[in-house]
Image: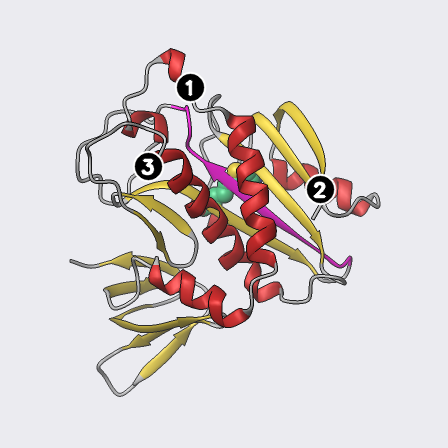
Amino acid sequence: MKFKVFKYDKVNSTNIVSHNLAKNGQNNFIVMANTQTDGKGRLNRSWASEEGGLYLSIVLDISKFEEIAHSNFIASLSVLTTLKEFSSSFNTSDDINYSIKWPNDILLNNCKICGILSELNIKENYIVIGIGVNLNNSLGNIDNDCSYKAISLNQMFENTEKEQIDKNLFLTRLLSNFTNYLTMNSDDLINNYKLNSETLNKNVKIILKDSELTGKVVNIDFNGLYLDTNSDLGIKLIEVGDCIHLR
Ligand code: BTN
């Protein structure tokens, strides 16, 4: 799939810019910025958007792309695959493990390296998939077990200034992987996601709007996460919520 690319130095949020462009008739495009002044995260959080990170929104026309429920899975797997491709080019003896924390955080050795915020506009027939990847930005001190705190690729591999990760190359690979996953059938897509899931089979705490649930994650599909509550509630389908992995 060919995407028209809109590149900016500084925006409030690539998601906000995307909504404006889509409402003005653009479709199948991407918006990229070097920094954001009002980066948006899931559940009304903000997303730190210093220079060096990748801040990107992909906008799809959903009258042509019907599998809307697939979009988060496609985006997560595209970022994960691209990160794996890049890491393999570093000479490192460290054990590097990429995984997906439900619904769509990408973790590098349990540290968050990417977050995804999808926003659907059914009335106007489009979806904005906002992707933030910590590439060359610095996120403060890290230790070996950063337990879901943020990390950047550059920090992980202790790159020097001269060895910045090439954001344009990363974007090219990401869009190519995204296009491949877009055409993948549902079974392969979900199986691929589950193979890379950090959350499946874990004991977790789910934070809902007004309550919390704990239990073991027994399955994940396009509808959400299936939590065995080990109580009268039985297995609960969780469609949206914050997920905390328990040890
Ligand atoms: C999260 O994990 O909470 C989701 C973070 C999503 C951040 C990206 S950065 C590019 C795009 N524009 C935004 O304002 N947010 C998303």
Residue at 56% x, 68% y is 185
Amino acid marked by disc 2 = Phe
According to the picture, the residue beneath numbered tag 3 turns out to be: 150
Relative to 192, is 228 above or below?
below
Q: Is residue 8 left or right of residue 71?
A: right
Of the numbered discs 1 and 3, the one sitting upstream in the chain is 3
In this view, the mark in front (3 or 2): 2
Q: Nearer the viewer, mark 1 or mark 3?
A: 1
Mark 3: amino acid:
Ala
**First to last magenta residue range:** 124-137
Question: How many labels were placed on the picture?
Answer: 3
Marks 2 and 1 close (CB-CB < 8 Å): no
Q: Which residue is mark 2?
A: 3
- Tell me what residue is drawn at x 34 percent, y 42 percent: 112
Q: CA distance from mark 3 to mark 2?
A: 29 Å
Mark 3 C-beta to ligand 1 under 8 Å? no
Please, what secondary structure does the residue beneath circle 2 have? loop
Marks 2 and 1, how far apart in space? 25 Å
Which residue extends farthest right? 25
Residue 171 in which image quadrant: top right
Between 108 and 230, the residue placed more toward the observer is: 108
User: CA separation, marks 1 and 3?
Assistant: 18 Å
Residue 180 vertical position relative to residue 223 in the rendered view, above or below: above
Q: Residues within 10 Å of mark 2 (few under 14, many from 20)?
A: some
Q: Could you say which disc has been placed on residue 164 in the image?
A: 1
